[in-house]
Image: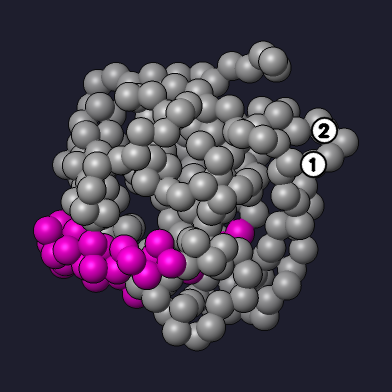
Amino acid sequence: MPRFLIPSAVVACGLTLGLAGCIRTHSDVVIHQPKPMVVDVNLSGTLTLVVKNARDDMRYITGHAPRKAAGLSTNPTIPVVDIPPATQPTTKSTGRPSSSLLRAHGMNPVIFADANPSAGKSAILKQLRADYPKVRALLGRHLVGEAHTGYLVARTHLSAGQARFVSQDNVLRRELYQAVAAETGQSMAQVGLSYYVIRLRYLAKGVWVQAKNQANGQWVWIHWNG
């Protein structure tokens, strides 16, 4: 069993979203690991309130309680994988330029439409709940994955309608995170990561998720087997 340390500040990592004017990328790597390791995230102070929001909101969005999967404790967890340095993943450009992309910290861009900051949290949650069956279907078909930033990311070519839907869902997620960040005084990165680790509990096995490579600290795509 490999030894690893996850600092308590991992949830508070300074992940940022920056503008990117092009590139849709696709990771060539598939992690051949029976099951990703999971590490409990230490929570304290107002971050606990973020996680409570995430738990309540995800239960409302999905319409059911989280599954009781092995390896997922009562605290939020981050999946980690042990990849030798010689087998580090590589990426390549596979798409055409698009000015509508915001590039996430990681290998793939996150697609957004125009935000609507005036939308109330309850309205955002209702729409996310209505969209949830489509999100689950896209994940189940391995067309998109759940990134550690809390957003959907295309894992292959999407149709125009699918890309538009992913864009709109990501906008709703961003507005939700903005509302929770304002309420709790936490950063958008902290909120997005907290929702990501709670969202893992609702995902079916085999869908694309990001795990942290403990060899170099980078986030890589794996098929979830939590």
Q: Which amino acid lies under the numbered mark 2 shown in the image of this protein? A: Pro
Would residue 147 appear left or right of 134 to someone viewing this image?
Answer: right
Would residue 180 appear left or right of 7 to someone viewing this image?
Answer: left
Between 127 and 183, which is closer to the camera in this rendering?
A: 127
Q: Residue at x 67, y 80 (%)?
A: 96
Determine which of the numbered discs, if any, sits on residue 85 in the image. 2
Q: In this rendering, is residue 87 above or below 118?
A: above
Q: CA distance from mark 1 to mark 2?
A: 5 Å
Q: Is residue 109 magenta?
A: yes
The boundaries of the magenta stretch are 108-137
When asked about the image quadrant of residue 74, the answer is top left
Q: Residue at x 25, y 27 (%)?
A: 48
Circle 2 sits in a helix, a strand or a loop, which is it? helix
Q: Which amino acid lies under the numbered mark 1 shown in the image of this protein? A: Gln
- Mark 1 vs 2: CB contact within 8 A: yes
Between 123 and 183, which is closer to the camera in this rendering?
A: 123
Between 213 and 13, which is closer to the camera in this rendering?
A: 213
Residue 207 point in image, percent of width and height = 53, 53
**Residue 45 seen in this snapshot:** yes
When asked about the image quadrant of residue 189, the answer is top left
Q: In this rendering, is residue 96 above or below 51?
A: below
Q: Residue at x 17, y 63 (%)?
A: 126
Determine which of the numbered discs, if any, sits on residue 57 in the image. none
Q: Residue furthest right?
A: 86
Q: Residues within 10 Å of mark 1 (few under 14, many from 20)?
A: few
Residue 225 point in image, percent of width and height = 55, 41
Q: Which residue is mark 1?
A: 88
**Residue 190 seen in this snapshot:** no
Residue 190 point in image, percent of width and height = 37, 38
Image quadrant holding the N terminus, namely: top right
